[in-house]
Image (cartoon, rainbow, N blue to C red):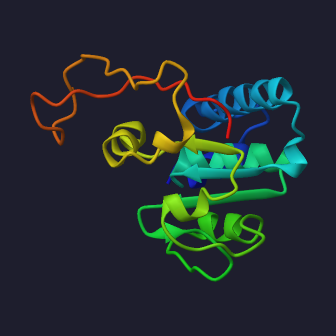
Amino acid sequence: RCFEVEEKLTEKTDIPIFHDDQHGTAIIVLAALLGALKLANKDISKVKIVMSGAGAAAQAVAKLILKAGAKNLILRDINGVISKNSKRDDVYLNDLAQKTNPNLEEGSLADILNGADVLIGLDNNFWEKAYESDILQPYVPLNNKVQKSGVEPKRPDQKPGRKTISSVCCQHF
């Protein structure tokens, strides 16, 4: 719904519309991505970028990354890899599917990470799921371990006593 609200506000007003969950996240992720690519001496148009998550924030991030010149961006959500072959109930996601995943890759997150240069995690509890499944183990975190934040979960759908991961710092792929 946030895309519909944004479109209506844009049509009815003559001021810029900024939704922090979408645009704020996209700006920060793009800045971090460009900085990391600069340090790794890689060109955004030549890297494979995998994104876990395809909600509103992830879609805004994907659009901005594409505008910045990315050519090989693959999104995956809870229902699988987004591609021209996957039809969703989300018109905005279907539009994005036409502009991403140029090689029509399919499979698990581990499958599409094969050959990836960048992984962006924007789904609920991504880092916790990645840590628990050992999906990040091949990429060796810089400090050789993923540190848990020690903060008790605040969301009702998380079990008490379960810790959440606040951040992970990994070497580039």
Tell me where residue 130 sits by quadrant: top left
Image position of 139 with respect to 36: above or below: below
Which residue lies at the image location 19% right of the left edge and 21% below the top edge? Answer: 152
Q: Is residue 12 left or right of residue 54?
A: right
Residue 48 spot, x, y in % from top left: 75, 53
Q: Quick check: can you spot residue 153?
A: yes
Q: Is residue 71 left or right of residue 119?
A: right
Q: Quick check: can you spot residue 8?
A: no
Front-lying residue, 19 or 16: 19
Number of numbered labels in the structure image: 0
Image position of 160 with respect to 67: above or below: above
Residue 118 spot, x, y in % from top left: 68, 43
Residue 21 spot, x, y in % from top left: 54, 34
Front-lying residue, 77 or 91: 77
Which residue lies at the image location 66% right of the left edge and 60% below the top edge? Answer: 74
Q: Is residue 151 left or right of residue 16?
A: left
Tell me where residue 27 sits by quadrant: top right
Tell me where residue 15 sits by quadrant: top right
Which residue lies at the image location 78% right of the left edge and 58% below the top edge? Answer: 72
Q: Residue furthest left?
A: 160
Front-lying residue, 39 or 64: 39
Q: Quadrant of the C terminus?
A: top right
Residue 51 spot, x, y in % from top left: 60, 50
Image position of 103 with respect to 148: above or below: below
